[in-house]
């Protein structure tokens, strides 16, 4: 029997813990966690994500600030806003939604966020702490942290002897995901577009994590029988069967075929997606606790 992970349910339990922690911090130290989310431009999908983040922050009892900036915002204007939020004592987490419009350079902006407020875990200080195995001192990127919750629930904290394959090498997901699996003693392969015999590499995986952004690229016969499959892709594809102009969301894994082979699998939507927001709230409350000492 294949287990299909209910990401919404797991995320809800993380959110419950965050709410209690936020309430306790306010009661005991008079500190309310504060999250500032910045979005530049008009991309509808990014706006939907950012609204969910701001809404969830409110629901968790945080101070929730959203800065919606026009497409023509300059590098200097965005940098100034980050500086203001860096200096704001009521803000413990700053998230700049990516991607930024083409005329803006994201890297200098991300690196200008104070590492202790970098709830995306993208600052080199946080990425470096993760790479050196310091899992408790920094902040870890939210989507890999969420995927790791699923891995731990399935396999426990120690992945000794297990082969993990991560497809994708982005700073936001693939690299931190590989680092987390390695820190948990898995034998990790980071595969990507230049990997030879990707299907063969995947067939060796006890834990297979796909983050490539290609709809249903990972086929059922790429999956080792009984493997844990974590699908990080969110792709919108045409769904003529639902009516003209209709679309649906699919992951990077061909779910129906992979589910016949896998031991544990995450669906899209309703798998990793809800965990990203939950872990963002968790990072914000952690940042607030650290600030409160
Ligand atoms: N765009 C898509 N996912 C993310 C994320 O986790 N953080 C940020 N900042 N932008 C994103």
Image: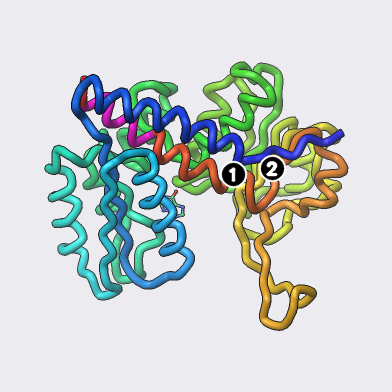
- 188 in the magenta segment: no
Identify the residue under disc 2: 266
Quadrant of the rendering where the C terminus is positioned: top left
Image-quadrant location for residue 68: bottom left
Residue at point 57%, 21% (across, down) = 184
Q: Is residue 113 depicted above or below 254 in this figure? A: above
Task: Residue 174: tell me if it is visible.
Answer: no
Q: Residue at x 40, y 38 (%)?
A: 281
Residue 252 place in picture, x, y as percent: 68, 54
Colour mode? Answer: rainbow
Q: Position of residue 173 (x, y in %)?
A: 51, 44
Tags 2 and 1 in contact by the CB under 8 Å rule? yes
Q: Secondary structure at mark 1?
A: helix
Which is nearer the eye, 198 or 43? 43
Residue 27, placed above or below residue 77: above
| Residue 268 x %, y % | 66, 52
Query: Residue at left 30%, top 34%?
Result: 125
Q: Residue at x 29, y 48 (%)?
A: 64
Q: Which mark is residue 272?
A: 1
Per the rendered image, the range of residues in magenta is 283-291
- Sequence-first tag of 2 and 1: 2
Query: How busy is the neighbourhood of tag 2: few (under 14 within 10 Å), some, or many (20 plus)?
Result: many
> How far separated are the C-alphas under marks 2 and 1?
7 Å
Does 124 sit above or below residue 180?
below
- The image shows residue 285, relative to residue 169, as above or below, that is above
């Amino acid at each position: 029997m294949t287990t299909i992970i209910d990401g919404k349910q797991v995320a809800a339990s993380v959110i419950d813990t965050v709410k209690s922690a936020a309430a306790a911090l306010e009661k005991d130290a008079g500190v309310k966690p504060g999250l500032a989310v910045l979005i530049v431009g008009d991309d509808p999908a990014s706006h939907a994500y950012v609204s969910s983040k701001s809404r969830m922050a409110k629901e968790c009892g945080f101070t929730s600030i959203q800065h919606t900036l026009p497409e023509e915002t300059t590098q200097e204007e965005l940098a100034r806003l980050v500086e203001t939020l860096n200096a704001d004592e009521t803000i413990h987490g700053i998230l700049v939604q990516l991607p930024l419009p083409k005329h803006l350079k994201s890297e200098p902006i991300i690196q200008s966020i104070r590492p202790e407020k970098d709830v995306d875990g993208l600052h080199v200080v946080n990425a470096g702490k993760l790479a050196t195995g310091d899992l408790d001192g920094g902040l870890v990127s939210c989507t890999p942290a969420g995927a790791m919750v699923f891995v731990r629930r399935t396999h426990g904290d120690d992945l000794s002897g297990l082969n993990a394959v991560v497809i994708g090498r982005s700073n936001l997901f693939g690299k931190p995901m590989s680092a987390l699996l390695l820190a948990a003693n898995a034998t990790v392969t980071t595969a990507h577009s230049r990997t030879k015999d990707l299907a063969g590499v995947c067939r060796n995986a006890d834990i297979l994590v796909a983050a490539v952004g290609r709809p249903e690229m990972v086929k059922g016969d790429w999956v080792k029988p009984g493997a844990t499959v974590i699908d990080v892709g969110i792709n919108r594809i045409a769904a003529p069967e639902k009516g003209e102009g209709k679309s649906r969301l699919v992951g990077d894994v061909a779910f129906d075929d992979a589910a016949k082979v896998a031991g544990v699998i995450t669906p899209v939507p309703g798998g990793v997606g809800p965990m990203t927001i939950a872990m963002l709230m968790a990072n914000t409350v952690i940042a607030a606790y650290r600030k409160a000492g």
